[in-house]
């Protein structure tokens, strides 16, 4: 293998989905920086890199199916269960089934037993972006000390109440603000958040149209 091919192979082996917007040279520099920094944000970047390398050789294994089920409890109160999923070419089980409850506040004539479904969407967006910040910081050799995301969304409830069909049911806008303390410059921190936004599944879900098929029996 010539030197040019060998270099291409090295770059491909270490390309990470979290930093794939970087040029090969920037990726190699990032790897070097990460190795020297010895930071610990609790993210196993080596495992992520290994998974990406394996999926490059077997892209069919990258097809995942995430699932949730939901049962009505009473009034507007419901309880969702999240357990197995499909991925890496097989059914994947967990050690436990997670439950997430949802309800509506008293101003909606409900019992306020849990967050509203729309607040859970905000929580999902915040968690996805925050996880991305941690993973990318680890990859770039940046030690995090604290990360806090604050989210606020606008909604005109005339839509969901059927007062005005011209008003959409969902959010009109979502604002996300990160307060991050880290051993990094302000520009580096902003770059972390920007890259997390580019790789966030939930950010993609809430900002792009998705086909949703609803059936009943």
Image: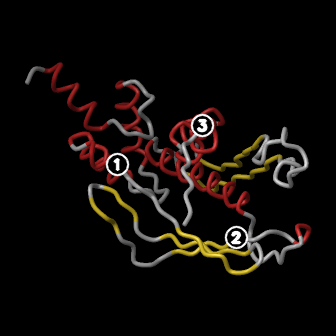
- Residue drawn 27% across and 61% down? 90
Q: Of marks 1 and 2, which one's residue comes earlier in the chain?
A: 1
- Give how far apart the Cα atoms at labels 3 and 2 are: 24 Å
Residue 194 vertical placement versus 61 (above, below) = above
- Residue drawn 41% across and 55% down? 65
Residue 159 coordinates in the image, percent (x, y) = 84, 48
Q: Of marks 1 and 3, which one's residue comes earlier in the chain?
A: 1
Residue 94 coordinates in the image, percent (x, y) = 39, 73
Quarter of the picture containing the C terminus is bottom right
Q: How many marks?
A: 3
Residue on which disc 3 sits: 208
- Residue drawn 44% across and 40% down? 18
User: Residue 65 versus residue 145: which sits nearer the camera?
Assistant: 65
Residue 143 coordinates in the image, percent (x, y) = 53, 50
Q: Which mark is residue 63?
A: 1
Residue on which disc 2 sits: 102
Query: In this image, 70 relative to 103: left or right?
Result: left
Q: Secondary structure at mark 2?
A: strand
Query: In this image, 108 relative to 122: left or right?
Result: right
Q: Secondary structure at mark 3?
A: loop
User: Residue 162 versus residue 191: which sits nearer the camera?
Assistant: 162
> Is label 3 in contact with label 2 (beta carbons under 8 Å)?
no
Crowding at mark 2 (Cα within 10 Å: few <14, some 14-19, many 20+): many
Query: In this image, 12 relative to 159: left or right?
Result: left
Crowding at mark 3 (Cα within 10 Å: few <14, some 14-19, many 20+): few
């Amino acid at each position: 293998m010539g030197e040019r091919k060998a270099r291409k192979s090295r770059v491909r082996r270490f390309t990470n989905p979290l930093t794939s917007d970087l040029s090969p040279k920037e990726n190699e520099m990032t790897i070097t920086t990460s190795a020297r920094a010895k930071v610990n944000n609790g993210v196993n970047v080596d495992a992520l890199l290994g998974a990406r390398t394996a999926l490059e050789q077997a892209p069919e294994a990258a097809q995942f199916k995430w699932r949730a089920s939901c049962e009505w409890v009473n009034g507007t109160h419901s309880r969702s269960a999240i357990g197995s999923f499909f991925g890496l070419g097989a059914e994947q089980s967990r050690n436990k089934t997670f439950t997430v409850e949802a309800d509506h506040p008293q101003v909606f004539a409900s019992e306020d037993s849990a967050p509203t479904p729309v607040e859970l969407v905000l929580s999902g967006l915040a968690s996805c972006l925050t996880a991305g910040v941690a993973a990318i910081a680890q990859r770039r050799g940046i030690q995090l000390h604290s990360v806090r995301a604050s989210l606020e969304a606008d909604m005109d409830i005339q839509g969901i109440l059927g007062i005005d069909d011209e008003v959409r049911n969902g959010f009109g806008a979502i604002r996300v603000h990160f307060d991050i303390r880290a051993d990094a410059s302000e520009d580096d921190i902003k770059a972390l958040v920007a890259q997390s936004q580019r790789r966030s599944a939930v950010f993609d879900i809430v900002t792009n149209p998705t086909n949703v098929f609803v059936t009943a029996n």
